[in-house]
Amino acid sequence: MNTRFIEAFLWSARLGSFRAAGERLNITQAAVAHRIASLEEDIGAKLFIRDPRELRLTSVGTRLLGYGERLLEIRQDIIALGRTDVQMLGLVRIGVIETVVHTWLVGFLENLRATYPGIEVQLTSETTRGLHRALHERSLDIAVQTEQIDEAGIRSTACLPMPMGWIGAGDAPGEQSLHELLAQPVLTMSPGSQPHEAVKKMFRDAGLPIGKVHCVSSISALVKLVSAGFGNAVMPLPPLLEHVQRGDIRFIRCPAQVPPQRLVVSHVEQVPASPDAIRVVADLACMASDRYTSSLCDLPPMASSHAGP
């Protein structure tokens, strides 16, 4: 199977269009469409639903995400056979948002240390705004955050988004209307974050003035507050699976859908120190993020599967 076809498929899924994938791969939109068509012919099934307004994955396309990422990782390992990884040296300063800390970060760092022992990582956790500022000031080399950065010298790569939704205390009703939820104290992440903006939009869409909204930057602190009955929260769901399984909190079904949390890996280009190491680590971060998120696709919708009767 041609790995260029897989690469075109993955970038189309990440960016949501053949045109954007073509720009990322430096090929034409028609070339991307041809590669996708060839891949669909090889597999014997459609991978995308081609709607005029958006590009959506079919069930087969969703399942292919994880396989495709692993295939490209294997290709990278094969290419690296002729090179000793100790030749890749340098300090790479990485900043990530809280969602990453509580999901795939540890496994990513362990894999990076085993594969590239010559790369030294300096890690920090910050809000998206703080990470943008650090990249702009060049005090960070890589930032894993929620927004595309349109700035010369910085390259941004969109990853698969993570589900977001409502959570409540373990004894909270498992299904509530939006008006019921907004009538209670609402907790969410730091001001200006994507979860916070989603909460404000829900109030506007419901025609309600913004009520009691508490912004807390720490996921661990949010879980403690919610489990104590201080209020319900809107936040990314994957970091909460263990807490739900223990019964500390529960996912709440709501007819009004919460948009998923975007995830973007941005890194500085053309730096005098460690340019190859920065690029390699940024690419590996993208793959680790997509591999983790695509592994969630085999689960039932989380907001309903754990909410209970």
Image: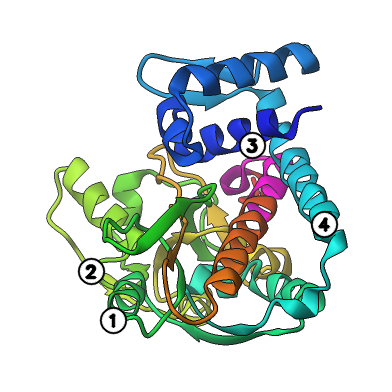
What's the residue at 67%, 59% (across, down)? 288
> What's under tag 2, amino acid-wise?
Lys
Q: Is residue 129 visible?
A: yes
Label annotation for residue 137:
1
297 over 170 or under it: above or below: above
Q: What residue is shown with label 2? A: 212
List the residue tagged with mark 4. 77
Which callout, 3 or 2, points at the residue further toward the start of the chain?
A: 3
Q: From the image, tell me which residue sits under label 3.
A: 7
Reading the chain from its start, which is encountered first: label 4 or label 3? Answer: 3
Task: Mark 4 and mark 3 in contact? Answer it, CB < 8 Å.
Answer: no
Task: Pick the residue in front: 224 or 301.
Answer: 301
Q: Is residue 300 magenta?
A: yes
User: How many other residues sit within 10 Å of disc 3, few (<14), some (14-19) or many (≥20)?
Assistant: many
Toward which corner of the image does residue 277 lie, by quadrant? bottom right
Q: Residues within 10 Å of mark 2 (few under 14, many from 20)?
A: few
Q: Amino acid at mark 4?
A: Asp
Mark-to-mark CA distance, 3 and 2: 45 Å
Question: Is residue 170 something that shows in the picture?
Answer: no
Amino acid type, callout 1? Glu
Write the start and end of the magenta stretch as one range: 292-304
Q: Nearer the viewer, residue 257 or 100?
A: 100
Image x and y of residue 201, in percent: 23, 49
Which of the two labelled residues, at mark 1 and mark 4, occupies the earlier sequence position? Answer: 4
Residue at 77% x, 83% y: name it. Answer: 117
Which of the two labelled residues, at mark 1 and mark 2, occupies the earlier sequence position? 1
Nearer-N-terminus badge (3/1): 3
Give the spatial CA distance, label 1 vs label 2. Answer: 35 Å
| 1 vs 2, front mark | 1
- Mark 1 residue element: helix
For the residue pair 140 and 88, the one nearer the viewer reads as: 88
Locate the N terminus and report the quarter of the image it occupies: top right
